[in-house]
Amino acid sequence: MLLRVHAGTVTIAHGGYWVLQDADPTAWNGALESTFAGVAGPDGLYLFSGRYSGDIAVSVEVHDSPPPPVSGWDKSVDLEACFPSRDAAAFCPEFVPSPELDAIQLPARFVTVRVMVNGWDEPASTEGGPESWLLQVWPSTTRRS
C-alpha cells in the first residue's frame, strides 16, 4: 500500500552526483554498484544523473510493502539500504534539500529502494532532454529493523 509520495526537483551542481541520504549520516563507504545508483555505506544511496548540471525531477514513493513492478523506465535497479534514523532527504550535497524532498519518513531502518530513471544519458552531458527519477521505498524483506 502506498503511504506517501514526495515529489520535487533536485538541482545538480557538477558531475551529476546526488543522494538519498539518512537525516543523520555517519559515514559513506560504498563501492560503485552500477553506473547510476548504489548503496553508500550505512547512510543511504548515491545516485548519478545523466546530466552534469541542472534540474532533475524526482519522486520518492514510500510503501509499507513491495509495490508491483513498474514498466516504462529506461533504467532500473533494486537496492537494499540502511537509514538509521528512518528519515531521509534527496538532494545534491552542494545544495540544501528542497522542502518537498526533505524529511522523508521511511517505513523501516532497512529498506529496499527500487531506483528508476528516464532520460538518462551516457556519457553524461549538459545538453539533452529532461531526466526524471522514481524511487520506490519499502521495508526490506531480507533485513529487519
Image (tube, helix red, strand yellow):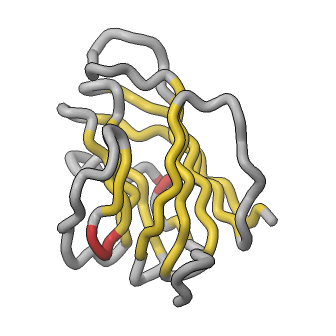
3 vs 31, left or right, is right
Q: With respect to residue 123, does 107 lie above or below?
A: below
Residue found at x 27% / y 26%: 53
- When the figure is inspected, residue 112 is found, relative to residue 61, above or below; the finding is below
Q: Position of residue 19 (x, y in %)?
A: 34, 53
Q: Is residue 131 above or below residue 133?
A: above
Residue 71 location, quadrant:
top right
Q: Position of residue 86 (x, y in %)?
A: 48, 79
Image coordinates of residue 56 in percent, x first then y, are 44, 32
In the image, taking residue 128 as reference, residue 125 lies left or right, namely left
**How far across and down, in percent of the image, does residue 41 sit?**
27, 70
Q: Is residue 50 left or right of residue 13?
A: right
Which quadrant, please, contains the N terminus? bottom right
Count of labels shown?
Answer: 0
Give whichever of 32, 85 is nearer the camera.
32
Residue 62 in the figure: left or right of residue 25: right
Residue positioned 22% across, 58% down in the render: 31
Residue farthest toward the top in the current orientation of the protein: 127
Pick whichever, 7 or 111, lies toward us: 111
Name the residue located 31 percent from the left edge and 51 percent from the top edge.
Answer: 33
Residue appearing at x 22%, y 78% in the figure = 26
Q: Residue furthest right?
A: 1
Query: Which one is in front, 88 or 114?
Result: 114
